[in-house]
Image (cartoon, helix red, strand yellow):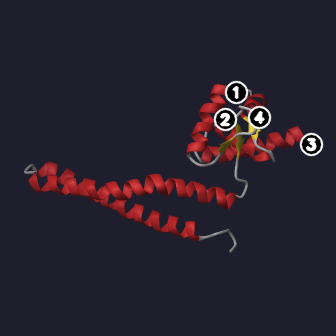
């Protein structure tokens, strides 16, 4: 098999795995191509490799950067944007977990108790039995979500304490 065919197989593997992470084919291809490069890869090179426009590459890179999978970088003497990826899978997962924790878990943790209290106050004021039933259901749903978020926070804490896999 040629190096190009083997590269294609590797990129297709990223596309298959990417589907399970809700990534588009292009996002998965970007990750695969960047992962294969020892040096940061320019976005212009990605347009040649993928056949997609620079605007499309740029939009998808913005998403991948926001979720912490890919990093933009530059090189002295050029205005081009280059992309790199952490090849250490544990470090990459750790970064994704940190990003998710910083935004999602913290936001849920701060907001859900306020929402529960609002529902409880509304329940105390409500006279209509059918609306009271709905409010009780909502309180139960949001309390369950709050407990689940606490479990996720505990798991996140454990993951972030581990320095490396296998240690």
Numbered label attached to residue 77: 4
Judging by the rendered image, the residue that carries numbered circle 2 is: 26
- Residue 29 seen from this side: no
* Residue position marked by numbered label 1 in the rendering: 52
Give me the disc on residue 7. Answer: none
> Which marked residue is nearer to the observer: mark 2 or mark 4?
4
Work out whether mark 1 precedes mark 3 in sequence or the reverse, and give the earlier one: 3
Assess whether mark 4 and mark 2 are in contact (beta carbons under 8 angstroms). no
Q: Please state which of residues 70 and 13 is positioned toward the viewer in this rendering.
A: 70
Q: Residue at x 72, y 32 (%)?
A: 80
Q: Residue furthest right?
A: 1
Gap between marks 2 and 1 measured at Cα? 8 Å
Residue matched to label 3: 1
First in residue order: circle 4 vs circle 1: 1
Secondary structure, mark 3, is: loop
Residue drawn at the location 68% of the way across and 68% of the way down: 165
Residue toward you, 165 or 14: 165
Quadrant location, the C terminus: bottom right
N-terminal of the pair, mark 2 or mark 3, is 3
Residue at the spot 60% in from the left edge and 60% down from the top edge:
94
Most distant residue in the left direction: 127
Of the numbered discs 2 and 4, the one sitting upstream in the chain is: 2
51 or 135: nearer the eye? 51
Asked if marks 2 and 3 touch (Cβ < 8 Å), the reply is no
N-terminal-most mark, 2 or 1: 2
Expressed as whole percent of the image width and height from the top left, the position of residue 27 reads: 65, 38
Q: How far apart are marks 4 and 1 (CA)?
A: 26 Å
């Amino acid at each position: 098999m040629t190096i190009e065919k083997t590269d294609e197989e590797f990129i297709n593997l990223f596309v298959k795995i990417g589907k399970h992470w809700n990534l588009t084919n292009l996002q998965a291809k970007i990750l695969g191509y960047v992962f294969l490069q020892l040096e940061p890869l320019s976005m212009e090179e990605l347009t040649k490799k993928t056949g997609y426009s620079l605007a499309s590459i740029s939009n998808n890179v913005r998403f991948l950067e926001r979720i912490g999978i890919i990093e933009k970088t530059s090189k002295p003497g050029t205005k081009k944007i280059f992309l790199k990826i952490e090849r250490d899978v544990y470090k990459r997962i750790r970064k994704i977990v940190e990003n998710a924790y910083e935004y999602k878990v913290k936001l849920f943790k701060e907001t859900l108790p306020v929402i529960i209290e609002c529902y409880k106050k509304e329940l105390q004021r409500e006279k209509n039995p059918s609306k009271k039933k709905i409010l009780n259901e909502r309180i139960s749903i949001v309390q369950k979500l709050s407990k689940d978020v606490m479990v996720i926070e505990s798991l996140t804490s454990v993951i972030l304490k581990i320095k490396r896999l296998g240690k």
